[in-house]
Amino acid sequence: MTGNRPSLTRFAWLAIAAAILTISLKACAYWLTGSVGLLSDALEALVNLVAASVVLVVLTIAARPADEEHPYGHDKAEYFSSGVEGGMFLLAALSIAATALNRLLHPQPLEQVGLGLTVSMIASLINFGIARTLFAAGRRYHSITLEADAQHLMTDAWTSAGVLLGVGAVRLAGWEWLDPIVALAVAANIVWTGVRLVRRSVLGLMDTALPLEEQTVIKNILNQYQHYGIQYHALRTRSAAARRFVSVHILVPGAWTVQRGHDLLERIEAQIREQLANATIFTHLEPLEDPVSWQDTGLDRTHAPQG
């Protein structure tokens, strides 16, 4: 588990319960009306159920403490969830698009539109409420998995609103061709969401650096010590879901004692942890006057030390 962060699986169970309820409601709405727009909405809800199940598994894994095989913890498991959910969204979009194109070529009249829209609206309001809850929890506990799931549900809520308007227009104007057009618009929106989620997952697995604003916080802390003749280099950062990793080399006068250098590093690390939650910091002490100290600024040392 990251720091003292409590188990987040209760939010996954909440999302699963909501997904089961909304699937039932949206499937009922499709059965009542025969609208492919509402069918696309129901398929998206089915993806949400599978995604919520993945979230439950991933959060259970991410909550495990560090062990011998995973000394840096299991936080990165959350990126797999984001990637899987993004991939499922893309598959759902293809299914929706295929169904909509077939209906566009073979239009059919809709039935019991009023009742169907009412049922679908209830499902959308449930999704909206759950999305707000998950998003708040994701921000509070720095969970990319909960934020991703919240984004899915919020997207679902807004696309549902578009579907409701489109199907309502079909009922009022009699434009049967509008129903599959609405479904295609939903598919396009789902593709965009899926691509963003897959990209976010890939960036996390590729050890992308912390956001620039967080790097600036770190640099501001380190720059405070330059007035005392202390330098730094080889600053590297990365994130693993809620966990932040920071490594930096601190250069001090060679005449300093080990104790004095150690006290300085402890002070610097404490300041960074005060500003950045869930930060694991690695500092390396080096003497300013030794030329070898300046040969390891890259990821790999270019020259071996002599002697």
Image (spheres, rainbow, N blue to C red):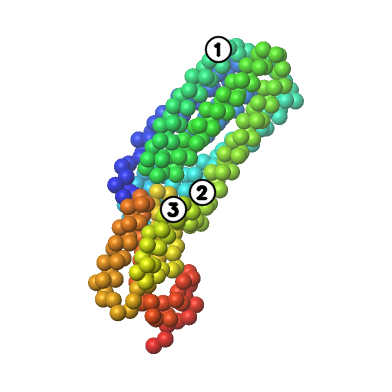
Mark 3 burial class by Cα count in 10 Å: few <14, some 14-19, many 20+: some
Circle 2 sits in a helix, a strand or a loop, which is it?
helix
Q: Secondary structure at mark 3?
A: helix
Who's the residue at 30% across and 79% down the image?
255
Residue 300 pos. (x, y %): 48, 72
From the image, tell me which residue sits under label 3: 214
145 vs 137, nearest the viewer: 137
Expressed as whole percent of the image width and height from the top left, the position of residue 185 reads 65, 30
User: What label sits on residue 201 in the rendered view?
Assistant: 2
Question: SS of the residue at dot 1?
Answer: helix
- Quick check: can you spot residue 28? no
- Residue 13 appears in the picture as rendered: yes
Q: Disc 3 to disc 1, how far (Cα)?
A: 50 Å
Distance between mark 3 and mark 2 Cα atoms:
20 Å
The residue to which callout 1 is attached is 115
At 36% from the left edge and 52% from the top edge, which residue is drawn? 275
Residue at the image point whose x is 49% and y is 19% from the top: 122
- Amino acid identity at mark 2: Ser
Relative side of 19 to 159, left or right: left
Q: Could you say where residue 3 lies in the image, as x and y percent from the top left? A: 31, 50
Q: State how far apart marks 1 and 2 are (Cα).
A: 40 Å
First reached walking from the N terminus: tag 3 or tag 1: 1
Q: Nearer the viewer, mark 1 or mark 2?
A: 2
Which image quadrant for residue 245?
Answer: bottom left
